[in-house]
Image (cartoon, helix red, strand yellow):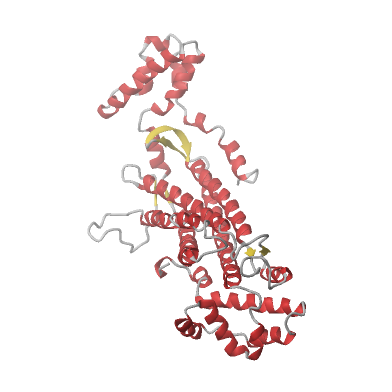
C-alpha cells in the first residue's frame, strides 16, 4: 500500500525486516524443539539464539543468484551461525516457515484492526447517545419515509461494526495456525512435537491436517472478514455523503480553518473523507475473489497463491487500518445540524404520518383498501400543493367527509406527532448497547 494510506505500526508488520525476523524465530524455535528431542545438538539451538541475524540486503543478493527466497534466507543465516547451521531447517519445507510467518503477520495485523474497531465503536456509541433523541426524517429509496433519530441511525452502524468485530476476532482465531509438518504434511522427517512447541512459542495453534501448506480456506475467511468491515465503512461513509448534500445539509464533515474544498470554487465544502473511505473500501473488498481462488491449488500445493498473498495481505490490512482510524476521526468531529434535520422532517407538511392516518381509519372501521385509496389521494395532492403553498396534508384530510365520518378534526390533528414515532427509542438502545446506554 502506498504511504499516503499507510500508518507506521501496520506497515511495519509487512516490512522485509519483520518478515525475515519472524522466520528466524520460527527456525530458532524449531531448533530448540529438535534439540529437546535429541534430534540435533543443543549447541545448534544455542548458535541460532546467539548468532542468528537477519540481513535483508544479503538475503536479496543471494536470492538474485539462487532464485529461491527461503534458500537465500537460510544461506544468509548460515553465514552468521557457522557450522551448526547444518542442523537448521531439518525436516522442514519452505512453506513451514512461510505459512507460519504469514499466520503471525495476519494475527498481528488483526490485533491492530481489532483495536481500531474498538476506537470506532466508542466514537459511534458516544455520538449515538448524544443524538439519541435528535429527530430526523427516515428515508427509503432516498424519499422521506417516517421519523427516526440520528442516534438510532448511528446505533445501527454501531451494531454492524460490533458484529464485524466478532467476525474479525473469529477470523483471527482461525488464521492463528502453525504448520511445521514437512514437504506434504506427513511429518515424515520431523516430529509433530516440534510443530506444537513452535506454535506455543508463537501463540498459534497447530494445523490439524495440512498438505505442503496451511489450507487456504482459512485465509479466504480472513479476507472476507476484512471485506465485511470495509462494506460497513462504505455504508456509513455513503450515508454521511448523502446527508451532506446541499439539498439535505443535515450533517457535514469537519472543515478545518484554512482547509480548501475546491481549486476552482471557494465556496465548496466537500465530503472528501467519506469519498476516500468509499474508494478504500472497494480496494479492500476486491481482495476477496483472489483469496477465494487461492483455495483450490494443485494437489498438495502449487505456488499460484503466493504472489496473490504478498499483495493482498499487506494492502488489505494497511488500507483497512488507515480507513478505520480515518472513519473514527470523521465520526468524532462530525458536524450535526438538528435544526436542519427538524426542517427537513417538517418539509412535507405531515406526509410522513400517512401510515398513522391509514391505521386510524382502519381501526375506526374503514376497510384497508378504502383507507389506503383515500389517504394516498390526499397525500399525492399534498405533494403538488406543497410547491404552491397549498393546503397541508392534515387540512385536506379534515376537509374530506369520507374521512371525517370516521375521524374528528381533533383526532386527525393528534395523528401528527413526531414523539409518537420515538416512543421505543430507549428499548432499541437497550437492545443494542445493553442497560448502560448512557
> Residue 124's spot in the image, x, y percent?
52, 51
Q: Of 293 and 225, which appears nearest the observer?
A: 293
Instruction: Say which of 68 and 130 sits in front.
Output: 68
Q: Is residue 434 left or right of residue 367?
A: right
Q: Is residue 294 above or below residue 149?
A: below
Quadrant, the N terminus? bottom left
Task: Residue 398 in the image: state x and y as whole percent.
Answer: 38, 15
Residue 61 image position (x, y, % from top left): 46, 85
Quadrant of the image occupied by residue 397: top left
Q: Residue at x 41, y 40 (%)?
A: 341
Task: Name the foreground residue: 376 vs 414.
Answer: 376
In the image, 11 versus 203, the foreground residue is 203
Q: Is any part of residue 363 visible from this angle?
A: yes
What is the tally of numbered marks visible in this picture?
0
**For the point 43% across and 50% down, which residue is it?**
234
For this orientation, the residue located farthest to the left is 264
Relative image position of residue 152 (x, y in whole percent)? 51, 41
Residue plotted at (57% across, 71% down):
98
Q: Is residue 120 visible?
A: no
* Relative horizontal placement of residue 386, taking residue 129 as reference (left or right): left
Task: Please tell me in which quadrant of the rendered image residue 104 appears.
Answer: bottom right
Relative to 189, is 56 above or below? below
Amino acid at each position: 500500500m502506498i504511504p499516503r494510506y499507510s500508518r507506521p505500526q501496520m506497515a511495519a508488520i509487512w516490512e522485509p525486516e519483520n518478515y525475515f525476523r519472524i522466520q528466524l524465530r520460527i527456525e530458532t524455535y524449531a531448533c530448540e524443539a529438535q534439540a529437546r528431542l535429541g534430534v540435533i545438538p543443543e549447541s545448534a539451538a544455542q548458535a541460532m539464539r546467539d548468532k542468528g541475524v537477519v540481513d535483508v540486503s544479503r538475503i536479496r543478493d543471494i536470492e538474485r543468484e539462487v532464485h529461491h527466497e527461503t534458500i537465500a534466507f537460510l544461506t544468509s543465516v548460515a553465514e552468521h551461525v557457522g557450522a551448526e547451521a547444518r542442523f537448521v531447517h531439518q525436516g522442514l519445507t519452505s512453506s513451514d516457515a512461510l505459512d507460519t510467518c504469514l499466520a503471525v503477520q495476519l494475527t498481528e495485523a488483526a490485533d491492530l484492526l481489532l483495536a481500531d474497531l474498538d476506537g470506532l465503536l466508542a466514537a459511534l456509541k458516544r455520538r449515538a447517545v448524544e443524538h439519541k433523541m435528535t429527530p430526523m426524517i427516515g428515508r427509503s429509496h432516498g424519499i422521506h419515509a417516517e421519523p427516526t433519530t440520528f442516534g438510532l441511525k448511528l446505533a445501527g452502524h454501531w451494531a454492524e461494526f460490533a458484529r464485524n468485530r466478532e467476525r474479525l476476532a473469529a477470523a483471527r482465531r482461525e488464521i492463528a495456525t502453525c504448520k511445521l509438518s514437512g514437504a506434504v504434511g506427513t511429518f515424515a522427517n520431523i516430529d509433530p512435537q516440534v510443530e506444537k512447541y513452535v506454535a506455543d512459542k508463537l501463540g498459534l495453534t497447530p494445523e490439524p491436517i495440512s498438505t505442503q501448506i496451511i489450507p487456504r480456506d482459512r485465509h479466504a475467511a480472513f479476507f472476507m472478514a476484512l471485506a465485511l468491515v470495509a462494506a460497513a465503512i462504505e455504508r456509513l461513509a455513503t450515508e454521511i455523503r448523502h446527508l451532506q448534500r446541499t439539498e439535505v445539509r443535515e450533517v457535514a464533515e469537519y472543515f478545518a480553518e484554512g482547509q480548501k474544498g475546491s481549486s476552482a470554487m471557494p465556496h465548496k465544502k466537500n465530503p472528501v473523507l467519506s469519498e476516500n473511505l468509499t474508494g478504500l473500501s472497494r480496494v479492500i473488498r476486491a481482495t476477496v475473489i483472489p483469496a477465494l481462488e487461492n483455495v483450490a491449488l494443485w494437489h498438495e500445493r502449487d505456488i499460484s497463491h503466493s504472489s496473490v498473498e504478498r499483495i493482498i495481505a499487506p494492502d488489505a490490512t494497511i488500507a483497512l487500518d488507515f480507513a478505520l482510524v480515518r472513519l473514527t476521526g470523521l465520526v468524532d468531529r462530525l458536524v450535526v445540524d438538528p435544526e436542519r434535520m427538524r426542517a427537513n422532517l417538517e418539509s412535507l407538511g405531515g406526509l410522513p404520518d400517512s401510515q398513522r392516518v391509514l391505521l386510524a381509519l382502519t381501526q375506526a372501521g374503514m376497510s384497508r383498501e378504502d383507507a389506503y385509496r383515500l389517504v394516498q389521494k390526499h397525500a399525492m395532492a399534498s405533494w403538488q400543493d406543497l410547491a404552491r403553498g397549498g393546503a397541508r396534508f392534515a387540512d385536506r384530510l379534515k376537509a374530506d367527509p369520507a374521512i371525517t365520518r370516521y375521524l374528528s378534526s381533533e383526532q386527525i390533528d393528534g395523528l401528527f406527532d413526531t414523539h409518537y414515532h420515538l416512543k421505543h427509542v430507549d428499548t432499541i438502545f437497550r437492545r443494542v448497547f445493553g442497560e448502560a446506554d448512557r
